[in-house]
Image (cartoon, rainbow, N blue to C red):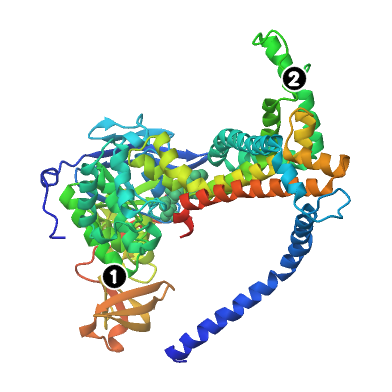
Amino acid sequence: MQALAPTPQQVAPAGRTLDVDNLTVRYGSAVAVDGVSLAIEPGEVVALLGPSGCGKTTLLRVIAGFVRQAGGRVLVDGAGIDHLPANQRNVGIVFQNYALFPHMTVAENVAHGLRARGQRGAAVGQRVERMLAMVQLGAFRERLPRQLSGGQQQRVALARALAVEPSILLLDEPFAALDRNLRLDMQIEVKRLQRQLGLTTILVTHDQDEAMSVADRIAVMNKGKVEQFDTPVAIYDRPQTLFVNGFIGTTNLLPGKVMAVMSDTATVALQAGATLRLPAPQGIAAGSSVILSVRPEQLVLSPVATAESWPIEPGLSLPLGPQLVLEARATCGTALKIVEPRRRIPTEVQRRFCALAPDARPSLFPRSTPSATE
Amino acid sequence: MSVASDLIDRPREEGRLRLAEWQLALPLSLAFAALFLAPLLLLGATSFFNDEKITQPGFASWTKFFGDPFNYKVILDTLLLGLKTVCATVVIGYPVALVYIDLPARLQKVLIFIIVMPMLLSVVVRTFAWIVVLGREGVVNQLLLWLGVISEPLRLLQTELGLVISLTQIEMPLMLLPLISVMSRLDPNLRDASAALGASRWRTLFTVIVPLSMPGLVAGCLLVFASSTTAFISQTVIGGVRLIYLPLVIWQQSLVVYNWPLAAVASLSLVVSVLSVIAALSYLGRRSSRHLHG
Ligand SMILES: Nc1ncnc2c1ncn2[C@@H]1O[C@H](COP(=O)(O)OP(=O)(O)OP(=O)(O)O)[C@@H](O)[C@H]1O
Ligand SMILES: [Mg+2]
């Protein structure tokens, strides 16, 4: 990597803004993308995270110009690009299956975009060499794609996309086919290249850890809609909807009822048998049914009963690295997962009650969030 | 089980598998030998007789056939007819295949049906249909006259042009089916990838789609060439007696003149000349698509 001397156009990266404005895509009568808006800063990496079929690939295909939207706009640096065909958008894309040209060598694959832009002669060769050096594949220039490993193919696809200096980079689950170690290497690699070139990037992924580690911001999608678009920390700690809450990390869901709302504080009686005073989100009224969501590491065990703790029946405990994962059941039947540091292995007596940790940031959701109905 | 014994066992198993596969192919090989190779040998033997009664062995039939410059012209015309038909089916068939891969699945089924339908009709029927279309009072002439493109009917029957037109239609399924089967297996992302890199549609067509569809194109060309050079019925019914191709010569010598040795020489000439063009075509095709099979 250190072999790459920065060239003038790489030193001063001029990232572009990418705005997706109320975008809707239909396949026949089915809505694949439903009013999605994203404002992406120059040089930012945004991860699109969501379950299969939620419209992530479709969104990328619209930005790249392969699919026409039914409504909404795509803007780069504030200018609409919807009227441009795919070959004039200068958007680099790496497909999940890489889509390398099987009849061309590695070098020819990388040169394809340069030739398409009218470059000829030695300049093409030099640029290809530089791109291959960047992804450390110089020795493989004469190989055909099928003579490469998955990770090598992925790097060729990246070199091919970056060779033409795109203004936007789209990555559609680029790491899905790689094994764990290679995936970590490639994540670091892509992040490094993206930083160096100052490329505004959208990364589609199924993998929340990947989204958390690579992205500056995450857009969590569900059924064609963006449920939340925020930093990884905010998505984890302050999920806006029950769907995001359940999709990111693991969580405990405790049903309860709002007894009273006083200014910003709600008094909630949990079915498990405790009464808690919690910060109330908007739209919560006294008497309504709610669900309290608490991360496993934000629950603590205690040997004594208080008004704010509830009795549990401890189940299996699994040592998991430095942590101990304890499964338990509340009296109302709700299954609970509690994570404790391994140092403090609780004894049997200490496992009788459960409460929120002092620094816990639980979330309160109305009982029927639209996204939780199915 | 140790690694060493694994290594020893594996080749033996592969050998066994290969033997089993070979045995599976045996019945078909025997049928080929009996129905294809034996008649060919018989044909070869027949050609080395001098007289029509097949009594005196000799090379007279060969020297007679190849001593006549007219026969060279017939061979050349036959091969040219095949090449022209191949060109016409490629020029018309390739765009159809391109359209096919872009159609929604429902319309693809309709198109496939339209392509295959002619194959469900006898060649004789299709050939006579072309007489109706191409004749002096036929659809083509009527239309051109009505449009004012021509002032008197064109002669299309009994011309090579008319024959190539009808053979193009008759042989089209043989071009389209292999072409479509190869093209619809292409990863659609390849075209998008090429476009995203800035390539125009034409550049993508010639640098990505055409090279990758080469196996289908070559297979189609071979089938159309072999089929059109030997299409006796269409050649004689539409070409008439004035256009002479090898199959007609063979028919005349074997069933009109009853000179079987000469008919055998003509048949072997047809087989050899068609096979050599096919061998050349498939060599070129393999070279251009070596990357696909390694
Ligand atoms: N060409 C198409 N024709 C019709 N429907 C399509 C087409 N492509 C996608 N869809 C539908 O649009 C929806 C969104 O698909 P998309 O490929 O964007 O999902 P995704 O989020 O990328 O899923 P995955 O994580 O499985 O790749 C799905 O319901 C899918 O069935
Ligand atoms: Mg997808």
Q: In this rendered view, identify the residue nearer to me: B265 or A206.
A: B265
Which numbered dot is residue B273? none
Residue A43 x/y as whole percent: 19, 46
Q: Which residue is mark 1?
A: A181
Instruction: Determine whether A249 is above or below B206 in the image.
Output: below
Q: Chain of mark 1?
A: A
Residue A353 x/y as whole percent: 31, 79
Q: Is mark 1 within 8 Å of ligand 1?
A: no
Mark 2 or mark 1, whichever is nearer to me = 2
Residue B208 x/y as whole percent: 43, 44
- Evaluate whether residue A90 shows in this view: yes
Q: Secondary structure at mark 2?
A: helix
Q: In this rendered view, identify the residue nearer to me: B150 or B244.
A: B244
Q: Residues within 10 Å of mark 1 (few under 14, many from 20)?
A: few
Residue B232 x/y as whole percent: 77, 39
Q: Is residue A336 left or right of residue B13?
A: left
Q: Chain of mark 2?
A: B
User: Mark 2 and mark 1, same subunit?
Assistant: no
Disc 2 from disc 1: Cα separation? 70 Å
Q: Which picture quadrant has residue B105?
A: top right
Q: In this rendered view, identify the residue nearer to me: B12 or A85.
A: B12
Q: Amino acid at mark 2?
A: Val
Q: Residues within 10 Å of mark 2 (few under 14, many from 20)?
A: some
Instruction: Determine whether B8 is above or below A230 in the image.
Output: below
- Evaluate whether residue A373 shows in this view: no
Instruction: Determine whether B12 is above or below A87 in the image.
Output: below
Q: Which residue is mark 2?
A: B139
Q: Which image quadrant: the N terminus of chain A?
A: bottom left
Q: Secondary structure at mark 1?
A: helix
